[in-house]
Amino acid sequence: MRDFTALPSRIDGAGTAGTRAAVLVVLLVELLISSLSYAQSPRPEQTQASKEKAAAAAPAPRHDISGTWEPAIAPGDGIQPFGAKAMPSDGKPEHQLPYTPLGLAAYKSHKALDGVDAVLPGFDNDPRGKCEPLGFPRMDLSNLRQTQILQNDYKIVILYENLQVWRVIWTDGRELPKVVDEGVLVGKEIREPRYYGYSVGKWVDDTSLVVDTVGTQGDDKTWIDLAGRPVSEALHVIERFHRVDRDRLELTVTIDDPKMYTKPWVAMDRFPFHLQDPHTDVMEMYCSPAEMEKYKKLVGDPISDTDVKPPER
Amino acid sequence: MKRLRAFSLVVGVLIAGNALPAHHGEAAYDSKNPVSLTGAVTEWYWANPHCILSFDVKNSKDQVSHWTGEASSPADMVNHGWTKLSLKPGDQVTVTLSPAKNGRPVGRITEVVLPNGQKVTGGFLGQGAPNTGAAGGSKPDENPKK
């Protein structure tokens, strides 16, 4: 069966006028169908996607999400200062998370620097303030920056710009480990939870990879985002990496943590990345306890000092 | 310049369209009453989590205030025209910042006029339009050709 998207490249050189007209009709129909599907939920990044489509984007390679990827809307689009991109902590009812009683208590114990319940810098208890490992899925939901993805036949490795950390997604067909009371059951062995979890990935079609992750750290070690939403060791994260075309990758992240939330919720919804030149050198972003200490001394503590009488303005 | 302004407006509208409360970590600052100060740099600290500009401001009675302005992280700053070498002790700068609500001489930078006259923002989300392309990494024309 002919692949219609490949037709134009096969019509090199002389073709009949009829064939050219047929190709034109096919291209127009394809453009119409793709613009209709984008019309269903117009958002700023959809306009960007439509523009890219209209510019006849190169097709997505099969089973390939490799490359250096930058957040497509703007370099800082993945900072997520109000928490998880698709469910920001802004007080709106549609962004209220479905907490269990344990989840709500855990959230209230977190003094975050961001979101609707933010505290002043001197009063936060975010583990990242001491340069503790961010862990997964927080690495997707806090300061997601230029992301390098490498893959071979066995695994996909994601290199995150923020904090220079990596994680491995196994694509060799192994089973997802099972979380049990004593830890994480990997094969016949019980292992410890990991900050970056245990991930397996499966291609569900030519351009979509679904990744399951379990075995991550719980509430005593990490948060889920900058707004201080909680996670437990019962967490199961589902990511969907969709290679839309050669230059665009979209990431969807679903959180399923029955201890903290009564039902799954979507933390990122088709977050778009744009493919960078493969020679692109990615900058360092690190957390240095010494630099953090100086920041607290020069900025964080002075602006949080509530003993000072504010000047009259 | 017109195109940059138009783009900034578009970006500003897109960000403002989210209708979210106070910017990231801005709760401690009085962003409705910014102040502009001119003085001499004592330190330009290029570090995480945020870069810090320390500068001395003299008033009409020759009294010196030691001010601290925070800018964004290096990874953001490089997209807003800054480098580690943008300033050195002794440089004269004009700094516009949102001052701390408690009156301490600390503020969140919105704009700096560098010694060469160049205006740069504090690098925070919503402040001006960042350069597109390699965020903090190499610029495309620095890369080897295939």
Image: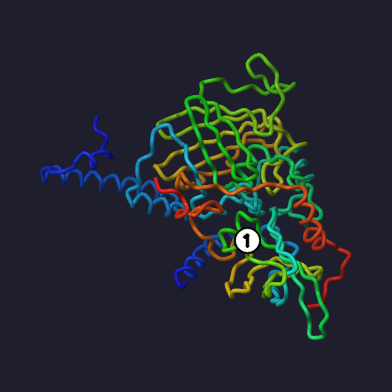
Q: As drawn, which residue projects farthest toward the top?
A: A188
Q: Quadrant of the N terminus of chain A?
A: top left
**Chain assignment, label 1:** B
Q: As drawn, which residue projects farthest toward the right?
A: A307
Give the quadrant of residue A207.
top left
Q: Residues within 10 Å of mark 1 (few under 14, many from 20)?
A: many
Question: Hey, what amino acid is under mark 1?
Answer: Phe
Percent across and percent down for residue B129 are: 53, 63
Percent across and percent down for residue B42 are: 75, 68
**Residue closest to the eye, A113 or A130:** A130
A166 to B66, vertically: above or below: above
B49 to A151, vertically: above or below: below
Percent across and percent down for residue A46 are: 44, 51
Q: Which residue is mark 1?
A: B124
**Residue closest to the eye, A18 or A74:** A74
A313 to A91, vertically: above or below: below
Secondary structure under the numbered disc 1 in the rendered image: loop
Q: Is residue A293 left or right of residue A212?
A: right
Residue depicted at 72% across the width and 23% down the height: A183
Give the quadrant of residue B107.
bottom right
Residue depicted at 53% across the width and 47% down the height: A281
